[in-house]
Amino acid sequence: MSAIKSLTARSQYAGKKRFSISAGFLFVLPAIIFVSIFFLWPLYKLIMMSFQDFPLLGDPSWIGLDNYKEAFTDDEFKGSFKITVIYTLIVTPLLFITGLGCALLIKGTSRISILFRTVFFVPVVIGFGSAAFLWFWFINPDTGYLPQILRDLGFGDMKESWTSTMPLALIMVVLMVVWKFTAFQMIGFMTGLQAIPQEINESAALDGATGMKNLRYISLPLLRRTIGLLLVLSVSGSLLAFDQFYIITAGRPEGQTQTIAFYLFRQAFLAFRLGYGAALSVILAVLLMIISLIQIKLSRMDTHE
Amino acid sequence: MNKRKLVVKTVAVVLALTPFLALTSNANAAGPVTLTFWSRPQGENGGIVKQLADAYNATHTDIQLKITIIPANDFVTKVATAYQSGEGPDLTSVDLIYVPFLASAGALEDLSSLVAGLSYKDKWDPAHVKLSMYNKKWYSLPFTGDASALFYNKDLFKKAGLDPEKGPASYAEVIDAAKKITALGGGNKGFYFSGACAGCQVFTFAPAIWASGGDMFGPIGEPKFTDPNVAAGLRYYNTMWKNGYVPEGAKTDDGKNFASMFYSGKVGMQVSGSFMIPELTTNHKDINFGIVPIPGPKKGQSSSFNGGDNIALLKGAAHPAEAREFLKWATNEGQKVLAQQKVLPTRMDIAKSDYVPQNPYYGVFYKAAAVGVAPWSTVYPAMVNDANGPWSRLITTTIFSGEIAKGVAAAQKTAEKIYKTAKK
Amino acid sequence: MNKTKRFFSVGPFSGPFRGWFVICLSLGFLFMFPLFSSFLTSLKPSAAASKFPPDYLPKEVTINNYERIFVPAKGGFLEYGAWHYTVNSLILAFGTVLGVSLLATLAGYGFSRFKFFGKSTLFAFILLMFMIPFQALLVPLFRILATFHLTNSLLGVIFVYITYNLPLSVFIMRNSFAEIPSAFEEAAMIDGASVLRIFRTIMMPLALPGLISTALFAFFASWNEFFAATVFISTNGKYPLPVMLTLLQSSQHGEIDWGLMQAGVIYTILPCVLIFLVLQKYYIQGLIAGGLKG
């Protein structure tokens, strides 16, 4: 370690340029090695697979763009596309609102605020699979507590499973995701809000901009980069959503809650068509890249400061 | 010099990690040949394969079995992936319906010559034999059985004026019994099935179609949803549904309530497997039940889904000769171990002598196994198990909507699309 | 006035309003209720846990569900109780945390402080990982692990986990280091401090929250991961906890044993919650430092 550090010293602070390139590179090298071997290499293979008829077992064969052609005429894929987009469009603003709302509530520095912050955050730290299983039980019409509460409140006998009709099935999953991730967005907003200098808020208050006005004209615009980041994470997470649908609805009813990632999983591991699944993955990835780029560009359109 | 320090540090880190290397696969020791054998959980506590292995290991010094149990849902993925990289096991117990897929992909050894030398090769049940074969060759051997039959509540039958000692023997008799039991009121319903569970329905409902000799699939898995017997079976269930002989929850039950409805004592009839017997006799003693074969449209017709596992030798296994020895044992003495552990053997003779006498109910399952069927398809998961596949869509909709012709046509179309991608 | 200032910093919606406490309490209850009810259910005997309709509070409290996790059933196929598999999970988790911490800190420092050839490209590769669904890469990954003879080994799984935790971690560490003005280092250099000393006394403490949250993320991710573990590991004794619990549940024929399932869920969740509670100060601070400021 001290070897590298000496290199660093010489390069960075004494300005010997010829070391700076290799020093920086050396620092990132271990990570890059891992990424290359365990991500880029399989990714390369995946892309190759997408141009092949690649069964889970047996010999693959090259078929060029046939998988992609099939994807564009595949009704089920299109359906999964639709539901994934709908899901993303619902979850993203919802999390935004709940996250912002909670942040506004507990952005104070008092002990109580911190306590509440911790409590709200607990669902974030439990594993995603565990959370999905938990929710799966929680809404179960026979043994779950949520239907029982509604029953006791007089909303009917709740015998029918909520994951077997639309839009209830989707709502259940959305509910779980909001429950789990609100606090994450909350922390994001909270730190962004705390970063806004007091003076700005104080002078705004003097001009009469408090509450909603402050939010609209002062705080939110200043939170642009935070919002941008949270959006990217939220949208890409939603577009890739799989576990929650696999565990809670299993694509029911009739495949209407089958997201792209779920359909891809089925093609690869149930239909044993890895080549087709690979093509679908590539399409999904390209989609994500485009969307992320757009979002980053939008949030970087810096305001007049 | 600085770079050398770096190298030293790297080496130190690597050495620090070597204890973890001990966790990687080990080299074999000399001594008995170890066969690796994978299976999903089977039997009452999931442990039957382990018990079998213990029994074998205790009596054999030259060959020892090493078992790995794998969650059922991921089983084929795991075996296939491992096999493709040369990391698969020697032997595998696999749900019989996956054998055609594995065989068609060339992963399994041809066992035809082994079978030819077995004295008991004609003693296996028909379903397992059919599923063992691909292109007329044997690629696996029958291993464990799991047949379905019709359970009925004797007390409800009596109350409804039906003979409690005679279960229904045809579609008409089932419908009639369901009608009478539902008429008793008090929340009693005549019949139950898990309407949203494709796998359950192929176990419980499909036999009603097979009993008449019909089938949704041809001998090599060609879709035949347009077979009139299929429509007849759908109509049979639909009749019971639309007349209210079936609890509402059936429509959306994805298997969660598969057993519990019958246990509640308010359901007159339900098709299920032998695994319900211990539950009933231990935890629900108040239910007086009988079991009969699953009836077909006409009296005297019956069928069953005989599932369970087959056992196969993977290509490239390290010790094929020893593995074949074990295969012989598994299909012979091993079957007796199965019977003792209350698992239905696939050897019909051993089933009769060792399994049936243990419990008065087992005789029905033995008979069911003798006429049992299992669908043969190289794309079984996509065709049958997939909650979004043609079978599932068909039974989860038409039984309740009654739009049978439409549903059948749609299923046939989807199935044909899938069949096109299947290896024949 | 002072009390107000203590509750809220000035900003949108400053000052506590009536009902603030009630609202926060209700929200807190809403967030915790599913967890709490799961816990209650795990304490019910099986029959009660699977009863319809469910009772809110257990009529009879038992730890039988937990016992069944820890003590392998006779005639079952699991040789060990949950503790053995927990140890496997701990090995995976600590290996991942160690590897990620090391690699991400180095890489984060490199990305934040140096210019070098291909820097943006390399960073982009790391971010690319956010865009590919992990299960798609499972089969190619297995083949690659097989090439290195790392299949059926916890080390192989650790390597995979390390790699897939790198994007977020590198991102966090890079931002953590970027926060530290280089003026600090330069001033210390002028004062004659060695680079190692600078790293130890200045950089690390300031980046520590980022490091801790990196470590925590890595822990949570590897502790809960199931699918890759199932495919890569082929010996029952090496299974981590999530796989063991799935096996336990799937071996129950027919009905789901809800009490057992909840016990499994609670047992899996517990370490995550405990660790979070202990380290939450750092964790949240780390998220802040790590990039949520944008």
Image (spheres, rainbow, N blue to C red):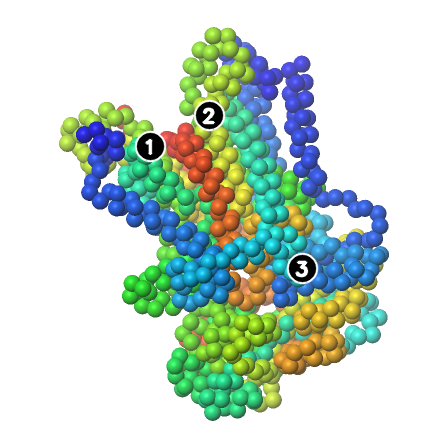
Q: How many marks?
A: 3
- Residue B40 vs residue B257: left or right? right
Q: CA distance from mark 3 to mark 1?
A: 53 Å
The circle on residue B39 is 3
Q: Residue at x 59, y 61 (%)?
A: C251
Q: Could you tell me which chain the residue with mark 1 belongs to? A: A
Asked if badge 2 and badge 3 are on a common chain, one would say: no
Q: Could you tell me which chain the residue with mark 3 belongs to? A: B
Residue of label 1: A192
Residue of label 2: C207
Q: CA distance from mark 2 to mark 1?
A: 19 Å
- Residue A255 vs residue A44: left or right? left
Q: Looking at the image, do the residues carrying marks 3 and 1 touch, with CB atoms under 8 Å apart?
A: no
Q: Residue at x 51, y 82 (%)?
A: B153
Above or below, comparing residue B373 to residue A226 in the picture: below
Q: x and y percent of residue B141 in the render?
A: 74, 67
Quarter in which the N terminus of chain B is drawn: top right
Quarter in which the C terminus of chain B is drawn: bottom right
Task: Decide: few, some or many residues near mark 2? Use Cα within 10 Å; few <14, some 14-19, many ≥20.
Answer: many
Above or below, comparing residue A234 to residue B257 in the picture: above
Whether residue A298 can be seen here: no
The circle on residue B325 is none
Q: Residue at x 69, y 30 (%)?
A: B15
Q: Could you tell me which chain the residue with mark 2 belongs to? A: C
